[in-house]
Image (tube, rainbow, N blue to C red):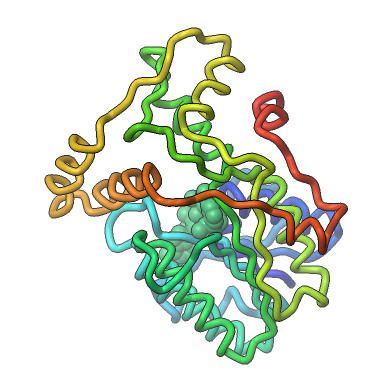
Amino acid sequence: MILIAGGSGRLGTQIVRRLAARGLAVRVLTRDRGRAAHFEQSQVDVVEGDVRDGRTLGAAMVKVTTVVSAIHGFGDIGDVSPASVDRDGNRRLIDAAVAANADVVLMSIVGASATHPMELFRMKHAAEEYLRASGAPWTIVRATAFAEFWLDLLDQTAATSGRPVIFGRGANPINFVSVSDVAELVERAVVDPSTRGATLEIGGPQNLSFNELAAGLQQASKRTATARHVPRAILRLLAAVLRPVQPHRARQIRAAITMDSIDLTFLPTELHRRFPELPITSLAEILAHR
Ligand SMILES: NC(=O)c1ccc[n+]([C@@H]2O[C@H](COP(=O)([O-])OP(=O)(O)OC[C@H]3O[C@@H](n4cnc5c(N)ncnc54)[C@H](OP(=O)(O)O)[C@@H]3O)[C@@H](O)[C@H]2O)c1
């Protein structure tokens, strides 16, 4: 049995479908089984649990041989944060996997480090370190930004005016990867024991600015209007005002400012040298299949 924590999410859903299509027994861990209602009942076992409470993980671990962590606490509300989910929640999940003698495949982020300006990257790094020292056989998959997530977000902001909203100047080059390419790598990591002990980094073929991403979206959507920009000064002000009342929104805005300024470029050459058969989907292909 393979447990996918975060199996209800954007990436997790694709991982679940791929593993189930291989005929493997899969179980989704979710805080609310309604979030896994899009799966065929017969295809997937669904267990409710919350990585912020280790007592809820016991039922999920029965007969589990591999745990996939595709969770994050970045944009959620309440007591959900990178610290409570990505660091502490992953630690609980890893402890439960060790107790069940299960392997762990952990989703992390390219650039995760103890000193990164973004909390999410620091908390992912803490989870990686915990996993490497845990004694469980492990594979870490680090991905760059998911292209489909950001395209959906730009599309949503364009819903009424036809003009996507970009936070900041939008000129900073960023590596965007297709979620389906990441799902294929995670599937590979689950079934291929030679990936144990490896940190695999995946990215897309191009580094693109938000201005370029938005322009591609506009063209594919047959919209002619250009993007709107929220200046960094306004973003800083908004983040400061929202911090005490809506910490998750303030966190997202601070992340947007950071994404507008730090180096987020990547070249996926190492991964494709190791696994030349893995797909490397371009933005044009992603836009064509939306
Ligand atoms: N999005 C990106 O650009 C990006 C880039 C690099 C790496 N990643 C990583 O890829 C993975 C998947 O990202 P995604 O964007 O596909 O995620 P997503 O669609 O936002 O889904 C997040 C998942 O986390 C689960 N989750 C959150 N808090 C939880 C908790 N307390 N207990 C149990 N489950 C919890 C949610 O499950 P329920 O709501 O059903 O409980 C949901 O399935 C994450 O590890 C993320 O850090 C994402």
The answer to whether residue 206 is seen in the rendering is: yes
Would you place residue 277 above or below residue 5 in this image? above
Would you place residue 174 above or below residue 76 in this image? above
How many numbered discs sit on the rendered protein?
Answer: 0
Q: Position of residue 216 (x, y in %)?
A: 57, 22
Q: Position of residue 256 (x, y in %)?
A: 35, 44
Which residue is pictured at 79% across the width and 62% down the height? 188
Q: Is residue 206 left or right of residue 241?
A: right
The answer to whether residue 33 is seen in the rendering is: no
Which residue is pictured at 69% across the width and 53% down the height? 268
In front: 237, or 183? Answer: 237
Q: Is residue 152 left or right of residue 65?
A: left
Which residue is pictured at 58% across the width and 43% down the height? 176
Q: Is residue 265 left or right of residue 195?
A: left
Q: Position of residue 237 (x, y in %)?
A: 15, 41
Which residue is pictured at 34% across the width and 34% down the height? 167
